[in-house]
Image: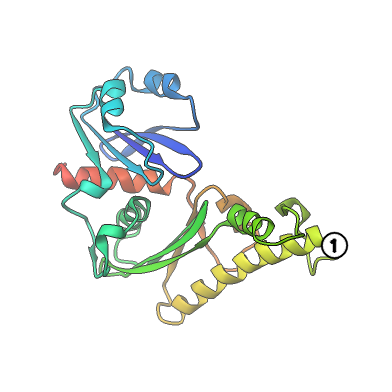
Amino acid sequence: MHLVIDKGNTAIKYGGYLKGKNIFEVRGENVLEEVKKHIQPYTIEALLFSDVSGELSPKDLLRQFTPKHLFRVSELKKFPFRHSYKTPHTLGEDRIALVAAAHKCYPKLPVLVIDAGSCITFDFLDADGEYHGGAISPGISMRFRSMEKFTGKLPLGSIENFPEGLGQSTHESLAAGVLSGILFEIEGRINQLKSQFSDLTVILTGGDAELLSKRLKNPIFAHPNFLLEGLDHLLSFNINE
């Protein structure tokens, strides 16, 4: 069995895979006992983890799960896709995994992967398997918190106050600015790429994916655990399975 772990800035996910097929997914803090119940019938041949928070310890992972092989995304030597990224050493482990998932799930198609979490990332893989880079911008929570922190009078906003049109109060105006701004940004990025790639496939994932997908006009595929699929693909590619 493959065990893959995604440690983001605000959440952690575990996934188990047998020959490329997902057999369990667990999300949340303090869930080690639940994960261990899932893996109990299996031998962990290999474990791959992505950690953008810097909080996971390889020694702890070896002790907790006793895998035969342990890998970290940033230390992998091979990738299933090509890239022309100018600073590959700075490319986030989560973004690498998302592009790998696009390569696995949508071969020979141009794919835009949008990950809506603490930050919103955009990553584009063309039909020939070439990664062209992307964009990073603040996520929903970060936008609300930055306006409260860097102004003298604005309160902390919330998406619960999102109006259908223009805001009629400060809280509504904050929500309209944040959520509408993100929706316009996503739609604009999609339309820009669609003007060049008419068969563009758009994937939306991350903690805020469900919230945003309901309000987007462009057709998208929502994949809550897309990153885990990419981690398993990377792991299989590097151990030649």
Name of the residue lying farthest toward the left: 240
Residue in the image at 66% along x and 60% along y: 147
Q: Position of residue 211 (x, y in %)?
A: 63, 52
Name of the residue lying farthest toward the bottom: 195
Quadrant occupied by the C terminus: top left
Q: Position of residue 122 (x, y in %)?
A: 44, 64
Residue 110 appears in view: no
Q: Is residue 1 left or right of residue 192?
A: left
State whether residue 185 is above or below residue 88.
below
**Residue marked by disc 1:** 169
Q: Position of residue 46 (x, y in %)?
A: 22, 33
State whether residue 127 is above or below residue 232.
below
For residue 86, what is the image quadrant? bottom left
Q: Position of residue 62 (x, y in %)?
A: 25, 26
Three-letter amino acid code of the residue under disc 1: Ser
Residue in the image at 27% along x and 32% along y: 58
Say few, some or many: other residues with alpha carbon within 10 Å of mark 1 (under 14 / 14 to 19 / 20 or more). few
